[in-house]
Amino acid sequence: MTDAVGESEGPTIPPFAERVLELAERIPPGKVMTYGDVAEFLASEEFPEGVPQQAGGPRQVGRVMALYGGGVPWWRVVRADGALLPGHERRALAHYREEGTPLRPSRGLAEAPSRLDMARARWDGR
């Protein structure tokens, strides 16, 4: 296929979203960061003078992951309570088991999915 005039290589991803996705890719296998951890980590980064710092909170991180996170290890960016992402429990659980991510049994029903053991699985970004 030849390049046509005006043809783009895909959607433009906002700078904040790029930073979220880059950090998601850096989370080691078997570790996780919460949406809030990601937001806090990105807000703490130092920027060279003249470079605008764009920050967002946990909800913005979640939105980025929902819109653009399919190409990165999305299962490593999680809720603060360790609950598995609704609608993606089986896929996430398969990734967690494959990577050896610490899990703990859910409270209540035996058939309920596990939760992440946040005390053991959480990564601080360093």
Image (tube, helix red, strand yellow):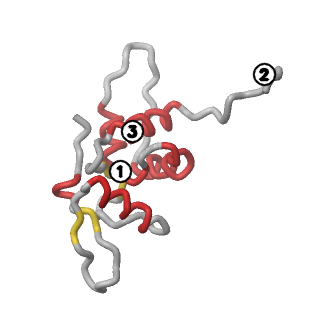
Label 1 secondary element: helix
Label 2 or label 1, whichever comes before in sequence order: 2
* Residue density around tag 1, few if under 14, some if 14–19, many if 20 or more, within 10 Å: many
* Residue density around tag 3, few if under 14, some if 14–19, many if 20 or more, within 10 Å: some
Label 2 secondary element: loop
Amino acid of disc 2: Asp
| Residue 109 in the image, given as x and y percentages of width and height | 30, 86
| Residue 39 in the image, given as x and y percentages of width and height | 36, 43
Label 2 or label 3, whichever comes before in sequence order: 2
Per the rendering, the mark at residue 76 is 1
Q: CA distance from mark 2 to mark 3?
A: 30 Å
Q: Classify the position of the C terminus by image quarter.
A: top left
Per the rendering, the mark at residue 47 is none
Q: CA distance from mark 2 to mark 1?
A: 36 Å
Q: Quadrant of residue 86?
A: bottom left
Q: Nearer the viewer, residue 97 or 22?
A: 97
Asked whether, in this view, residue 116 is left or right of residue 14, the answer is: left
Q: Which residue is mark 3?
A: 25
